[in-house]
Amino acid sequence: MIFQTSFYKSKKLLLIEDCEPVRASIKGMLQQIGFEDITTVTDAVQAMPLAKADGFDFILADFDLGPGQDALQFFTELSQQALLRVGCCFILMSAEPRRLPVLGVLKGAPDGFILKPFSYLELEKRLAKAWNNRSKLRKVYQALRQQDYKAAQLELDQLINAVNATSLQALRIMAEVLLAEGSYAAALKLYEQVTQQRDFSWAQLGKAVAELQLAEYQMAETQLLSLLEQDDIRPEALQWLACVYMRQGRFDAAAKQLNELLRLQSSHITAHYASACMLLLQGQPDAAVKYWQKLIQQYRFSGFDRAEYYFSLCRLLLEQAQRAAQAEFAGLLKKAAEALAAMPQKLSNEHTEAAQAVLRARISVLQGNIADAKQQCGLLSALTEATEPELLLDYARLTFALGDVKAADACLARLKAFSPVTADLAGCCQRLTAQFLLQQELQLREQIPAWNQQGMAQAQGGNAEQALLLLRQAFMFMPCNAALVLNMLQALSQLPASKSLLPLAKSALTALEFSSKTAANQQRLAQLLPALPALYLD
């Protein structure tokens, strides 16, 4: 053995293995190695709360954990939520050879992989090697956890210059640090130096990524197309090739790469998110609705379920409801509310509460519950500092609908200045989505006064039905604008009483109560009320 049993005696280990006999056998090996504090669970669902509560020194996880997340996806979630201790070693086990991520050390990568079956001596060797590497890189990982790239580079320089077993790993991390801080030319130079010495897959891929970030799209595409021939790197090559095409606006080509990536890795969450984004960017909202519905149905009772599926579906259905004819409005609004309500409680946390609240408030506005929406909006003022594009637009549309144009404009300004945290597939999608949402909202801002003006022109020309259609369309997005509501009431007063129009009339009168009204507005309302059918005033 490399370390004495006394070394392991003080260490805490989490063992994740779904097969009871195998779990018992591995636990026996760990006890033979020297571990005493061993926690065993069968899957990632059981492991997650333990990982949050206990500071483990080692996590040993079987790759296949049954239905739900595999061990690599579980590790990724732990890393993204910063739940792993800086010094914790994460080791994967599997009865079959597994491919670990080629690029992405900076975001966190498992410390090792061990092929089953193995002896306790092989296991101890793997654990000791992981601990040694993790210990030598501890200060680097601490700096990266704080996103202090300069401090990380100073530590990495020392490790690289030492020329030992850790130097290559340090060199790999250094290149990714340069990418993360935006030093793309320096990263490219470093990757080129590495590939001149040895053709590592991670260096080839890193070179293509650096070229992409430098907008050398043709060079990046050529490099990535060649990497598609290598099985060990093909998924990452497909992912970054999709980024190349997305950055160029070649959405059909990007979608093709994403489809191929999902064929290889059907539960690739980021690829699903990107595929839905492609549908929106290609002007296919109906197809995007079906895509999110399919994901919800497919993953609802698994570890791959995500709150974003429900939020995205709710947003799209709200948009459809706002643009729908009067006869279809109630049904679509009900579907939007049901989509949000269908989100499992297990997905509710501090990260999802804001999105849930603002979407509920948007639904309340369209249901005519203006008072409830205003109350909820008052509790959401912190959202002016939100960073997610979709959440920013949700809050902008909510405040705009409630008549707070200043708050809405502040959100749009943040959306305009949005810069994604990462430059990978997720970051690329976020940036394109932000640009698309901003453009969509600015076009809507231009369309609302046009609908209003055209509606009044139709009303003055005696075409009350057409006037109401146009004014109602504007009202769906800006219900708490007194002048607009009064225009719509004028069109309603020119039409015979109708039970089908009763909900619209009631919504307009309710919205008017919560709208800021000038003296002229008050006078006009007093003139309009007697002209409205009694049905609407009961």
Image (cartoon, helix red, strand yellow):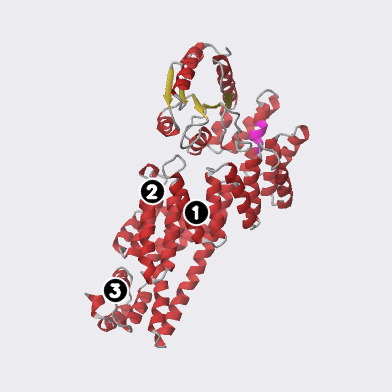
Label 1: element kind: helix
Per the image, label 3 sits on a secondary structure element best described as: helix
Residue 492: percent from left, percent from top: 33, 80
Pinpoint residue 231: horizontal percent, then vertical percent: 67, 37
First along the sequence among labels 1 and 3 = 1
Foreground tag (1 vs 2): 1
- Where is residue 140 drawn, in percent x and y? 58, 31
Farthest residue to the left: give it: 538
Position of the N terminus, as image quadrant, is top right
Kind of residue indicated by mark 3: Leu
Query: Residue 157: x, y in percent?
Result: 67, 31
Q: Which residue is the site of mark 1? A: 291
The answer to whether the residue labelled 1 contacts the one labelled 2, judged by CB atoms less than 8 Å apart, is no
Furthest-right residue in this view: 196
Above or below: residue 384 compared with residue 69: below
Along the viewing direction, whichever of 52 and 243 lies nearer the viewer: 243
Res 478 seen here = no
Residue to which mark 2 is pinned = 343
For the residue carrying disc 1, how many other residues have a C-alpha within 10 Å: few (<14), some (14-19), or many (20+)?
Answer: some
Residue drawn at (39%, 50%), measured in percent from left and top? 354
Which amino acid is tagged 1? Tyr
| Mark 1 and mark 2: Cα distance apart in space | 16 Å
Identify the mark at residue 43; answer none if there is no mark. Answer: none
Between disc 1 and disc 2, whose residue precedes?
1
Residue depicted at 54% across the width and 46% down the height: 270
**Start-end of magenta stretch:** 170-175
- Foreground mark, 1 or 3? 1
Does label 2 or label 3 sit earlier along the sequence? 2
Q: Quadrant of residue 489?
A: bottom left
| Residue for badge 3 | 502
